[in-house]
Image (tube, helix red, strand yellow):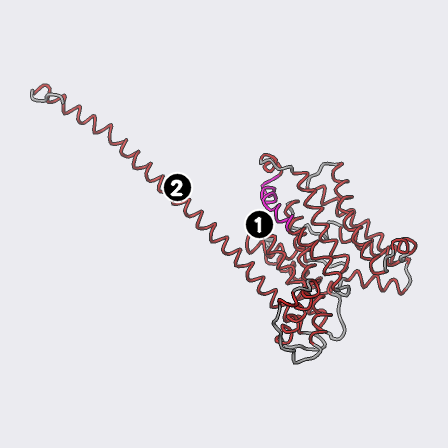
Amino acid sequence: MNDCSGSGTRLSCIEEILLRLRTSKPSRQNAKQTMNETTKNSGSAQNVHLLYGEGTKRRLLLIGILVFLLITASIISAGIGTVSISPADTLLAIGEGTRNAAIVVVPSLNNVITITLPAPENPQAGIIVNNFRLPRILLAILTGMSLAVAGTVMQGLLRNPLVSPFTLGMSSAAAFGAAMAIVIGPGIAATLFFLSYESWIVLFAFVSGWLSMLLIYGIARSRGTNQATLILAGVVIGYLFQAGVLALKYLSNNDKLRELTTWLMGGMWGASWDAVILLIPCCIVCFIILESMSWDMNTLAAGDDVAKSMGINVERTRLFGLMVATFVASCCLAFTGIIGFVGLMSPHICRMLIGNDHRYLIPASALLGALILLVSDTVARTILSPVEIPVGIVMYIIGGLFFLYLILRGRGRGLY
């Protein structure tokens, strides 16, 4: 310590103490400010984690609600029709049918499954539900899921909320393939490949719809594979295939024209267990592949340059995703005909409810698409029972009203 006993040194000592106090005060304030900033940062990080957790819970809750609604709608739909069946008889018929199917696939289960279900009160419930209504319900669910997932993936990859299998020309290409099979007939090729008339229509529709995306991507690649070029190429190809459909309509006779018009309206008349068994593995594999690409689609939402800087091969990702989405949509449309608006409505509704995170948007859109198409098909086959309305007509009405509502609701602030 300094000696402050003298009068001369006492004054200098006091000045030194005051100088130390002045220099130490800002440092204390800086330390206090640093502590406050650290506390704020930790608090903001906790708030971000809380908000993320709440958002995740909300998304999972929506998916759970959609699963419950889809199961409920399936049971109700199986009991509604020309012959009404109670929910209890419907469940008993489905349970007995599931048990019998499992034993047929694995005969050894006959000794394992010893539970016997009571017979339904309606003796015709098992035949009606398992042989007629359940295949139709499953086909509607698979088709709704496929169209909704395809629409979600196409919108994510091309960053355009108005893109769908319908607007990219894939539906028109599938319609052209089916029109060729219907108007020209099986001919020599069907005889050579031992295909039935219905199988010939399904094959032509599937091949035409899937190859249309290769044609669209090839045209777009010659001009640069950006999303605007892909969308424009899809619209142009769609018009060309539509012209081909109109030409085949003009050349067809009355019977062929009626059959072609009915197919173009869309419906579940081609529902059968063979179609469902063929579509289930295709849909499951495609859904898993597209769900695994959700992180890439989330990154693409920030732009191609950002995605490239994150190590994503944008061109390959876009081509692969579009081809898988087109494949699964073509598989289902080949059996049902042209059904519009499912690939547009489901992603729009889910995006408004849970945002743009494709990890949750893809499964939520799939469930909502299945629910929308199942309810629409139930209405189409029961509203004028025993006469059935093509489900495509119902979907056009619902889709048109929905987007009209969005336009009127979003005046001056966009669709969202």
Q: Quadrant of residue 19?
A: top left
Of the residues tagged 2 and 1, which is closer to the observer? 1
Q: As displayed, is residue 103 above or below residue 180?
A: below
**Cα distance between the residues tagged 2 and 1:** 28 Å
| Residue under pointer 1 | 359
N-terminal label among 2 and 1: 2
Image coords of residue 358 (percent x, y): 59, 49
Image coords of residue 186 (percent x, y): 89, 57
For the magenta stretch, what is the residue range?
A: 288-303
How crowded pointer 1 is (Cα within 10 Å; few <14, some 14-19, many 20+) is rated as some
Is residue 199 left or right of 359 when viewed as pictured?
right
Q: Amino acid at mark 1?
A: Arg
Q: Amino acid at mark 2?
A: Asn
Residue sitting nearer the eye, 13 or 118: 118
How crowded pointer 2 is (Cα within 10 Å; few <14, some 14-19, many 20+) is rated as few
Image coords of residue 206 (percent x, y): 78, 53
Q: As displayed, is residue 48 above or below residue 271?
A: above
Identified at 88% across, 55% down, the residue is: 190
Q: As displayed, is residue 197 above or below residue 35?
A: below
| Residue under pointer 2 | 41
Identified at 89% across, 65% down, the residue is: 255
In the picture as drawn, the residue positioned furthest to the bottom comes out as: 121
Is residue 225 left or right of 291 when viewed as pictured?
right
Q: Main secondary structure of the magenta part?
A: helix
Q: Quadrant of residue 251?
A: bottom right
Is residue 223 left or right of 409 when viewed as pictured?
right
